[in-house]
Image (spheres, helix red, strand yellow):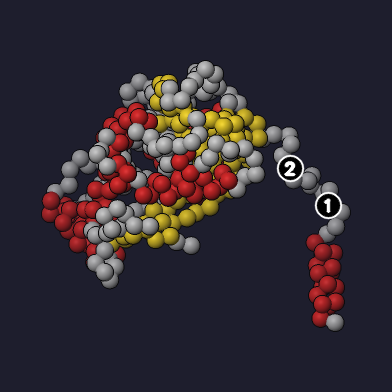
């Protein structure tokens, strides 16, 4: 996959107030954005959510936002593939943190009856991509979902949940709005995302300024993600890791694209400014440590894909402990007899 300018190459490596879903037409907008600075009482306040809203709105207002959509479109298509892998249709679905609708464009109306697209940025909703599925736009924060219990058959989320302050609460709310036997399919950035950029900035800042501050937001570990899904009430969990590597002409082009994606850092403890000499040194370190033979530099995006189901009595359950009628030793004997028969 080539970025439009032809210089980038994508390389793939192996309980809240209710809003009724009735009488809502296509592109109608409902709002559920909390007051400025609002957050869950139990959450660590790591990210400036108001700044993240401004960053995403700014990115969606750019003359050519599709120029920076390549990563989110790729991950959106992979989530759509996972939806198609489930042999059923979903009358009502929710895309949480939808952006410009990167998942909906890859799905069809035979699979999804109606799609609610929720995002914190109103400009992203206004400039959403075309889809054949009837959609409803909802201006809502991922931390404060405005939907009733047991509303949706399917909830999807792509590259959005890494910016929430209270991920456990967000997952609990997703579980809350799902119907029994409903499924959540999501993707979020993993801990090794942009490790090249992180290391280069830290080394340059330490050498030039005697210390460093975080310039890349913290990401969750894959082991913690499975635990949080289980704690939120999901069962039959699947969590797998993928990597996408993109080559850029240099570090500054990478940072420009991150800004165009609306993925600039919004941590409260970030530094607002880096000196010019430090930035130039970081670019040189990046090229020296990670540069490709053709002069480009790679950026790695680690993606965690997750699937979790809300409990329903019709779902398959493990047998009770001690109910087995055949031991593993007997199974091994059967295998030995079969292998002897094949040799003879």
Q: Residues within 10 Å of mark 1 (few under 14, many from 20)?
A: few
Task: Residue 142: give x, y in percent of width and height.
Answer: 44, 31
Judging by the rendered image, the residue that carries numbered circle 2 is 317
C-alpha span from label 2 to label 1: 14 Å
Mark toward the viewer: 2 or 1: 2
Q: Determine contact: label 2, label 1, CB under 8 Å.
A: no
Task: Residue 187: give x, y in percent of width and height.
Answer: 47, 45
Of residue 313 and residue 267, the one placed in the foreground of this image is 313
Judging by the rendered image, the residue that carries numbered circle 1 is 324
Q: Is residue 239 left or right of residue 161?
A: right
Asked if 262 appears above or below 195 in the picture, the reply is above
Task: Residue 261: give x, y in percent of width and height.
Answer: 31, 43
Of residue 85 and residue 241, the one placed in the foreground of this image is 85
Q: Residue at x 82, y 64 (%)?
A: 331
**Where, by quadrant of the figure, is residue 105 drawn?**
top left
Q: Is residue 199 left or right of residue 245?
A: left
């Amino acid at each position: 996959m080539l970025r439009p300018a032809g210089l980038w190459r994508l390389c793939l490596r192996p309980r809240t107030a209710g809003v009724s879903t009735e009488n809502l037409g296509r592109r109608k907008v409902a709002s559920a954005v909390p007051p400025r600075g609002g957050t869950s009482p139990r959450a660590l306040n790591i990210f400036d959510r108001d700044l993240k809203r401004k960053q995403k709105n700014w990115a969606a207002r750019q003359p050519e936002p599709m120029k920076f959509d390549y990563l989110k479109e790729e991950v959106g298509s992979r989530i759509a593939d996972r939806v198609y892998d489930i042999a059923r249709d979903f009358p009502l679905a929710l895309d949480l943190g939808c952006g410009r609708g990167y998942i909906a464009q890859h799905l069809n109306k035979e699979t999804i009856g109606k799609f609610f697209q929720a995002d914190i940025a109103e400009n992203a909703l206004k400039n959403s991509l075309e889809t054949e599925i009837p959609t409803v736009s909802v201006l809502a924060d991922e931390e404060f979902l405005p939907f009733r219990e047991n509303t949706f058959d399917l909830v999807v989320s792509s590259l959005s949940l890494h910016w929430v302050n209270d991920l456990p609460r967000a997952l609990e709310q997703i579980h809350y709005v799902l119907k029994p036997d409903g499924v959540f399919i999501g993707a979020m950035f993993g801990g090794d995302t942009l490790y090249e950029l992180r290391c280069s900035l830290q080394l340059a800042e330490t050498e030039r300024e005697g210390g460093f501050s975080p310039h890349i937001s913290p990401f969750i570990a894959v082991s913690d993600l499975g635990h949080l899904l289980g704690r939120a009430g999901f069962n039959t969990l699947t969590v797998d890791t993928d990597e996408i590597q993109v080559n850029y002409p240099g570090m500054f082009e990478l940072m420009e694209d991150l800004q165009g994606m609306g993925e600039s850092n919004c941590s409260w403890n970030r530094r607002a400014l880096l000196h010019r000499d430090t930035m130039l040194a970081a670019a040189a370190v990046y090229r020296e440590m990670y540069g490709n033979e053709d002069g480009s530099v790679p950026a790695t995006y680690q993606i965690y894909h997750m699937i979790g189901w809300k409990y329903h009595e019709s779902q398959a359950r493990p047998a009770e402990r001690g109910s087995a009628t055949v031991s593993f030793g007997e199974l091994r004997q059967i295998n030995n007899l079969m292998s002897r028969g094949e040799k003879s």
